[in-house]
Amino acid sequence: MKTVFEINEKIRNNNAVVVTAEEMISIVDELGAEKAALEVDVVTTGTFGAMCSSGAFLNFGHSDPPIKMYRTLINGVEAYSGVAAVDAYMGATQVNSDDDIDIAYGGAHVLEDLVAGKEVELVAEGYTTDCYPRKKVATTITIDDLNQAILINPRNCYQSYNGATNSTEEKLYTYMGALLPEYGNLNYSGAGQLNPMQNDYNRETKTYNTLGMGTRIFLGGAEGYIIGAGTQHSPNNAFGTMMVKGNLKEMNIKYLRGATIPKYGCTLFMGIGVPIPVLNAEIAKACAIKDEDIQIPVLDYGVPRRSRPTVGTINYNEARTGKVKLEVEVSGKKVEKTIKTASVSSYKVSREISKELQDWILNGEFMLTERLEPLEKYAPKPMKAKMKLVKDILSRPAVVGTIKMSITEASRILIENNINHLPIVDEKEMLSGIITSWDIAKAMAQDIGSISEIMTKSVLCATPDETIDMAARKMSRNNISGLPIVDSNNMVVGVVSAEDISKLIGRTGLNKI
Amino acid sequence: MKKRVFYWISGNNVREPVVSLVVLETGAMVNILKAKMEPREGFLILEVTGSELQVDSAITILKKYGEAEDIPKIIQKDDNLCIDCGSCVVHCPVGALSVDSDYKILLDEDECIGCKNCAKVCPVNAIKVFEI
Ligand code: SF4
Ligand code: SF4
């Protein structure tokens, strides 16, 4: 019907009709898709959220004498410099190498500081060659001192994202933010009805109507381009992503912000807007997608596995009200629970982006491009890595003690079996406590006579189906050296100690776990 | 209205039930946000809620037994830094943070009790909570 060329002509002549994706909803509702497609030329979209998979290629120019940089730090954050003598890639999630600064300052913050025009400290080490004799440089630079600062983000602008909640009794810190215990909150991300990829998605063919390699976009406050499908792009289930490129030197910290997700690490908040040329009714219809039509699968982040259990499904409209009702399982029973929702991306800034892009086009400052290629059709696969479960390293039968046992008896069991942890079971053989060799030593010194007086009663345990990594993390987080392993009836099936795990790592190498 | 004060009390007045007195005589509501009592002196942070008259007479009574000083502000949200993500809202125990109809995140300084939950989750350090 229409072509991008014709739309650009209209933009040039100041008579293009440009609306935001929010405005398009009511236009299509009122006129229908056919008429809306005649009426509207461009729909602008926007999103602003944490996009970890981001970074920039920086070229520092040659020093005198020249150096071949192999370890490059900017404000203490390492940039990958195995590219060429004076090129480096600063990844957004790279954390500061200084332990005192920790994860609160990282690659994303370096990028923000550069965009803000601040001075940053560059320290690079080289290995010397005949052509690159210099060993070290240490200097301060600003973004103006760089030859190029090119943002190339491998995976941005997720079309949809999961909501995250937490069924466990502990507060969890995840890349989706802090999750309060027992379904205390539900964090979600994304611009929903303003999201660029949602508005361009053809729900029948599971492809994108107009965007692809070569599409000119709004990127961090400047012009940028889509250069292909992003990593983990998964169009079949509406989880598309894109890879983007833009000139960092032209960007604005309003739309590019370094951030720290508490106890997780740093990430870059990126602002992206994509103009969608309304070439026909099908495209117009896709642009009228509403928050209530976009589903958010809610996953339980309390299960740290690749496939986290789905607790339910909500839509963006519900999420934005601040609370949702979900049927969840609490100690084996299904109960309806009202859960507070929290966004971890900004709908306000997403809106501002769609409006700013609208202004650019209306002012004739931004021309649309026709894509060179549609996005590739990938389907992401999981990593091919073996997983070991706790049950794989359990030696059976479990060595346990009883409450009635004397301390001497318990210590004999520890010595005979050459172990340090003894789970204590009750008459029904269910776990009721644990003692360690240290508890026994203390009991001896203090002249205490009964097991029940020295045992730890609230025992942290693991199940046979947990991964070894989860068990190891439980031990290190709680500063303990052994975990009783219990089945679903709370019967002890074994013990895993920190020693078992370190032996396993020592014997097979980390990669085998 | 709501007013927060540092309250310092010393000598024999330490044993006076000052807070109860204020409540009984003025009908104002008094929240004790912090209290540290020593043998000869006490230090409290109080939040007095009520009508202007109630709050004023509460302060007068307080001053009879000790020294009261206004706490102007315990929290500050830098709107230039804030990216209006909304991560902080659910972590506030008293509902001092909210989302308006334009999805801007608002902070009601008067409601804040200074727990710092929001400051801890904010990804861009937009919130400062002052020690009181
Ligand atoms: S400091 Fe605590 S009470 Fe005050 S706004 Fe933040 S979360 Fe709410
Ligand atoms: S968490 Fe920080 S950036 Fe996000 S809305 Fe709250 S104050 Fe603003």
Image: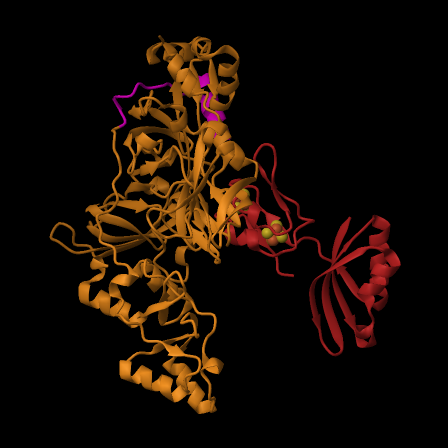
Chain colours: A orange, B red
> Where's the N terminus of chain A, which quadrant?
top left
Q: Is residue A492 left or right of residue A338?
A: left
Which region shows up in magenta?
A: A352-375
> Is residue A469 or residue B132 the one in the foreground?
A469
> Is residue A399 or residue A162 the one in the foreground?
A399
Query: How many marks overall?
Result: 0
Return the x and y of residue A240 as percentages of the image width and height: 33, 32
Q: Quadrant of residue A52?
A: top left
Q: Is residue A356 magenta?
A: yes
Q: Residue furthest front?
A: A428
Return the x and y of residue B61 as percentages of the image width and height: 86, 62
Q: Residue at x 64, y 47 (%)?
A: B96
Q: Quadrant of residue A381?
A: top left
Above or below, A79 against A209 in this view is below
Q: From where the camera sits, is residue B82 visible?
A: no
Q: Is residue A461 magenta?
A: no
Q: Is residue A247 left or right of residue A456?
A: left
Above or below, A245 against A91 in this view is above
> Is residue B65 or residue A291 the one in the foreground?
A291
Q: From where the camera sits, is residue A157 visible?
A: yes
Above or below, A226 against A341 in this view is above
Q: Residue at x 49, y 82 (%)?
A: A453
Q: Is residue A446 left or right of residue A392?
A: right
Return the x and y of residue A154 as percentages of the image width and height: 30, 38
Return the x and y of residue A212 as percentages of the image width and height: 30, 25
Q: Residue furthest left?
A: A130
Q: Quadrant of residue A369?
A: top left
> Where's the C terminus of chain A, which quadrant?
bottom left
Q: Residue at x 43, y 29 (%)?
A: A195
Q: Residue furthest right?
A: B25
